[in-house]
Image: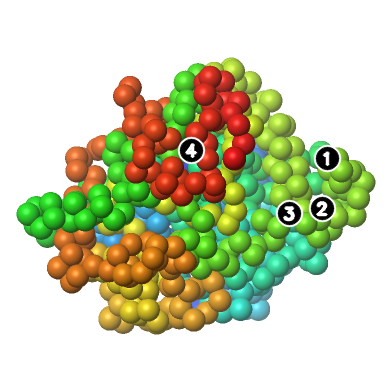
């Protein structure tokens, strides 16, 4: 199952497979498919497996063979584990974190490295000679055809790297503005309208994916509850090829692998949060951890749940999902930049182009529409086409869509979802934008956190975070940059709200909290039941739940009361 998660294609098609296998790096004869290059760009090398990874691809890359149509050919592209699978380094040891955040990988930076390799090959006849020699017998292409392919794919990656992912400063490893990247790819790239592209200015890290299928809402801003459309949007933003021009071919024809996406989500339902490895990172002080448990229950648990969690009212077929606290941005005070993304802008400010006639009312035939309308039209069109081919039963479809009704009371924006605490030790840096390097720093008053720090590769088990010494990583995170603020989620002796989420802690209390967080999960293989346990803690009956206390923001207490998925909207 682990290998399937690593290498099952979601349909992304970054570049032809033969180029991935045989292309040299820009500044050497070493191939871009080598383990050395893989580690350089932050992906995790993986061994060959005759059945599950015969090509020896790194974690997060998958091969897809499109048998016919306008995208016919063998491609290599990203799967979700490229970003949602981590690895921590400590004293020469590597700790694999399945479903964790890859704090060393940047998809835009990877694309830039590939396009540099292509440009160098086009400029160097010897490099092109060696590429032709290695590909001989695998592809039937003349030298001129190979040049043309390198030029076309290179232009595609140029646009993806420098236009789709343009930013005012380098976000560094482990961060990208995913919401705007998806918006730019769909609304600017697929529509071929550069005017629709916006600057990416809200870097975030990839969320943890254990307990994601079990959660009522996902993404940092709690904007999706339906896995099919969430995952389809992500894959479209990660270079699925799709046709929106009826004059060029079949509408919505795509390289997407919807079956693979549903299977990936299904497998993640069985992923347990990682348990602290005492043999590698040191033994837990259980006495100190017990003090920390009390502090967490008193100061953190109203928002951040841990196993066995709080649960929603039942959706269709009585299925429940983890009800994470949805906290107003103005309350938690963390960086608000992602809510300025065009992806969340409800105004009809983006050109519709060739999609104008297929948009829903009131935008049908109009020149412009909101980003989400354009995105949803694409996603629903692709999903309808390829779901029909899967011929799912009603029960299979409900399972694939997390039993939602389509009338769910969505959390208002701007909000941030408070993630569960299980396995949080394995996911530095902290806050949604990776602006706080360690848990120790997160427990400080915000004004006392480091304004700049080295983003290290190695793990710091004492402070529970990344090495900031500069010995294992030289990229400097500057929290004064737009989108990178480390404000908010502060612990101070002030009234709660406006960025203050709890009282100030003493030095001893901070170490106690860190020690307790190391104990979560408290059992190996502690998989959260998909659909809810037999005797759930019902969130909307729990007086300690943040959204029960903070009235008038997000209230789903009446949702799904009869179990059919038709509840009231926010009061």
Instruction: Identify which residue is drawn at 59% across, 18% down.
Output: 394
The residue lying toward the viewer, choosing from 489 and 522, is 489
Instruction: Identify which residue is drawn at 71% across, 58% down.
Output: 345
Q: Which residue is mark 2?
A: 369
Check disc 2 and report its element: helix, strand or loop: strand
C-alpha gap between disc 4 and disc 1: 27 Å
C-alpha gap between disc 1 and disc 2: 10 Å
Q: Quadrant of residue 146?
A: bottom right
Tell me whether circle 3 and circle 2 mark residues in contact (CB < 8 Å): no
Q: Which residue is mark 4?
A: 216
Q: Which residue is mark 1?
A: 360
C-alpha gap between disc 2 and disc 4: 28 Å
In the rendered view, tell whether residue 331 sits above or below residue 218: below
C-alpha gap between disc 3 and disc 2: 9 Å
How packed mark 2 is, by other alpha carbons closer than 10 Å (few <14, some 14-19, many 20 or more), is many
Q: Nearer the viewer, mark 4 or mark 1?
A: 4
C-alpha gap between disc 3 and disc 4: 23 Å
Q: Quadrant of residue 70?
A: top right
Q: Quadrant of residue 202?
A: bottom right
Check disc 1 and report its element: helix, strand or loop: loop
Check disc 4 and report its element: helix, strand or loop: loop
């Amino acid at each position: 199952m682990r290998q399937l998660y690593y290498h099952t294609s979601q349909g992304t098609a970054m570049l032809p497979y033969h180029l991935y296998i045989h292309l040299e790096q820009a500044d050497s004869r070493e191939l871009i498919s080598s383990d050395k290059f893989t580690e350089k760009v932050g992906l995790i090398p993986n061994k060959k497996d005759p059945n599950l990874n015969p090509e020896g691809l790194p974690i997060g890359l998958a091969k897809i063979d499109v048998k016919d149509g306008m995208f016919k050919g063998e491609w290599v592209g990203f799967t979700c584990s490229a970003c949602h699978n981590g690895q921590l380094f400590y004293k020469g040891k590597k700790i694999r974190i399945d479903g964790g955040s890859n704090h060393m990988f940047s998809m835009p930076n990877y694309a830039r490295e590939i396009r540099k390799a292509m440009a160098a090959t086009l400029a160097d006849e010897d490099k092109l000679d060696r590429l032709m020699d290695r590909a001989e017998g695998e592809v039937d292409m003349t030298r001129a055809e190979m040049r043309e392919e390198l030029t076309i794919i290179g232009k595609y990656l140029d646009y993806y790297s420098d236009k789709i992912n343009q930013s005012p400063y380098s976000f560094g490893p482990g961060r990208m503005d995913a919401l705007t990247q998806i918006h730019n790819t769909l609304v600017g790239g697929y529509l071929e309208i550069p005017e629709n592209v916006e600057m990416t200015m809200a870097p975030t890290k990839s969320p943890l994916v254990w307990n994601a299928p079990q959660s009522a809402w996902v993404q940092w801003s709690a904007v999706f509850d339906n896995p099919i459309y969430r995952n389809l949007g992500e894959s479209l933003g990660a270079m699925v090829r799709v046709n929106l021009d009826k004059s060029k071919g079949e509408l919505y024809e795509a390289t997407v692998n919807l079956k693979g996406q549903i299977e990936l989500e299904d497998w993640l339902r069985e992923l347990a949060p990682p348990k602290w490895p005492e043999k590698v990172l040191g033994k837990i002080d259980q006495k100190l951890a017990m003090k920390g448990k009390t502090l967490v229950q008193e100061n953190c648990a109203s928002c951040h749940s841990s196993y066995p969690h709080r649960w929603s009212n039942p959706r269709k077929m009585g299925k429940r999902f983890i009800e994470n606290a949805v906290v107003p941005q103005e309350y938690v005070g963390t960086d608000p930049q992602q809510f300025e993304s065009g992806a969340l802008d409800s105004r009809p400010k983006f050109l519709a182009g060739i999609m104008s006639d297929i948009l829903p009312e009131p935008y049908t035939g109009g020149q412009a529409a909101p980003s989400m309308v354009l995105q949803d039209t694409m996603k629903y069109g692709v999903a309808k086409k390829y779901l029909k081919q899967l011929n799912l039963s009603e029960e299979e479809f409900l399972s694939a869509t997390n039993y939602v009704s389509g009338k769910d009371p969505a959390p208002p924006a701007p909000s941030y979802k408070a993630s569960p605490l299980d396995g949080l030790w394995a996911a530095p840096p902290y806050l949604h934008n990776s602006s706080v390097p360690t848990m120790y720093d997160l427990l400080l008053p915000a004004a006392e956190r480091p304004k700049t720090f080295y983003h290290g590769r190695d793990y710091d088990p004492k402070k529970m975070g990344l090495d900031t010494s500069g010995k294992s990583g030289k990229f400097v995170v500057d929290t004064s940059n737009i989108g990178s603020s480390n404000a908010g989620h502060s612990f101070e002796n002030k009234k709660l709200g406006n960025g203050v989420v709890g009282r100030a802690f003493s030095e001893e209390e901070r170490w106690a909290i860190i020690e307790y967080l190391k104990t979560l999960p408290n059992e190996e293989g502690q998989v959260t039941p998909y659909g809810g346990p037999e005797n759930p803690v019902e969130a909307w009956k729990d007086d300690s739940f943040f959204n029960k206390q903070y009235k008038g923001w997000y209230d789903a207490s009446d949702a799904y009361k009869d179990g059919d998925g038709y509840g009231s909207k926010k009061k």
